[in-house]
Amino acid sequence: MSAEGLYPHGSFDIDAFKTTLKASTLKCFANIIAKHAGETLCSFAYLTEDDVMTISCAANTQEAIARETDPDLQDEARFNVSAWPHDDGNAWLDAAYRMLVWQSRLRMQAATSPKPLSANTSRRALFEEPQPIGPFRRTVFETLVATLSELRQEGVFDDFGQDFGLLVQVSDGEQIPDMVSRLNSDEKFLDGYRAFAGLV
C-alpha cells in the first residue's frame, strides 16, 4: 500500500491494519493446525501489551493443559495466553506487528526530540505521524477483538467445536472490557476465564 501510494499520509490506517491482521491470522492459524495435527486445539489468542507496541498469537491444546498435573495451575495453563505452548506461524503477523511498532517508535521520538519530528527522523516519519496513545490503544484493542469475532462468525474455528476459546490478552495491563463475552459463548469457558481473571 505504501509503495502504491494508497496509504493515507499523516495517519495510522486502522482499516489497513485490520485487513492485514485478518489475512495474517488465517495464515497463522492454518500453520498451527498443520503443525499440531495430532493434538486437540482448544483455544487461539492474540497477545499484546498496554502500549500496543507488538502483537503475537498463541494456541492451546487439551493435551498441553493435561500435562499440567498441579490442579492449582490448570487454570493458568488453560487461560493464561502467555503460558500457551504453540506460537507457530507468528511470522505471518509481521506486517501487522511492524505497523504497531512503528507507531511506538514515532511516539518515543516525538517525546524525546527537541526538534520537529520531521527534521530528526527518516523520510517515513513525514509519511505517518504519531497517534495519541489513549485513542490509539482503544482503537487497536477494539480492532483485535473485532477481527477475531469476525473470523468466528465466518466459521474459521467451527471445526473445533463451540467451546473453542478465543482471547485477546494484554500482558501488562487491564484486560479489554467485555472481550471474553464478545468472543465466546460457551458458558463453561466463560465462567472459567472470569474466575481466573477475577471478573466474578
Image (cartoon, rainbow, N blue to C red):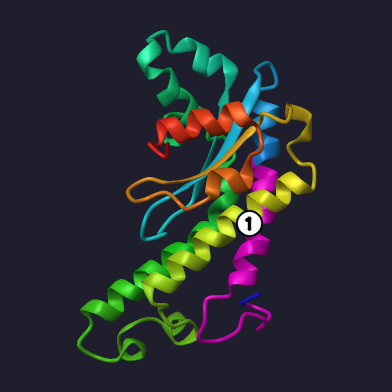
Query: What residue is shown at x 36% (from left), y 89% (from top)?
Result: 118
- Which of the 4 quarters of the picture holds residue 18? bottom right
Depth order, front residue of 107/2: 107
Depth order, front residue of 189/148: 189
The three-letter code of the residue at mark 1 reads Ala
Query: What residue is shown at x 57% (from left), y 29% (from top)?
Result: 189
**In the rendered structure, does residue 182 fall within the stretch colored magenta?**
no
Judge left or right: residue 109 versus residue 9: left
Q: How many labels does the image show?
A: 1
The span shown in magenta is 3-28
Q: Find residue 178 and report its horizontal and vertical position in percent.
A: 53, 50
Picture layout, residue 171 above or below residue 99: above
Picture layout, residue 182 above or below residue 162: below
Asked if residue 95 shows in the view, the reply is no
Quadrant that contains the N terminus: bottom right
Query: Which residue is under mark 1?
Result: 146
**In the rendered structure, does residue 5 fall within the stretch colored magenta?**
yes
Quadrant that contains the C terminus: top left
Q: Find residue 177 and report its horizontal and vertical position in percent.
A: 47, 53
Q: Find residue 138 and report its horizontal and vertical position in percent.
A: 47, 65
Asked which secondary structure carries label 1, the reply is helix
Picture layout, residue 92 above or below residue 160: below
Q: Find residue 188 and report its horizontal and vertical position in percent.
A: 59, 26
Please rate how many residues cluster around mark 1, counting C-alpha atoms within 10 Å: few if below 14, some from 14 to 19, many from 20.
some
Taking the view exactly as shown, the residue that stands out farthest to the front is 200
Judge left or right: residue 121 versus residue 32: left
- Which of the 4 quarters of the picture holds residue 134? bottom left
Query: What residue is shown at x 50% (from left), y 46% (from top)?
Result: 56
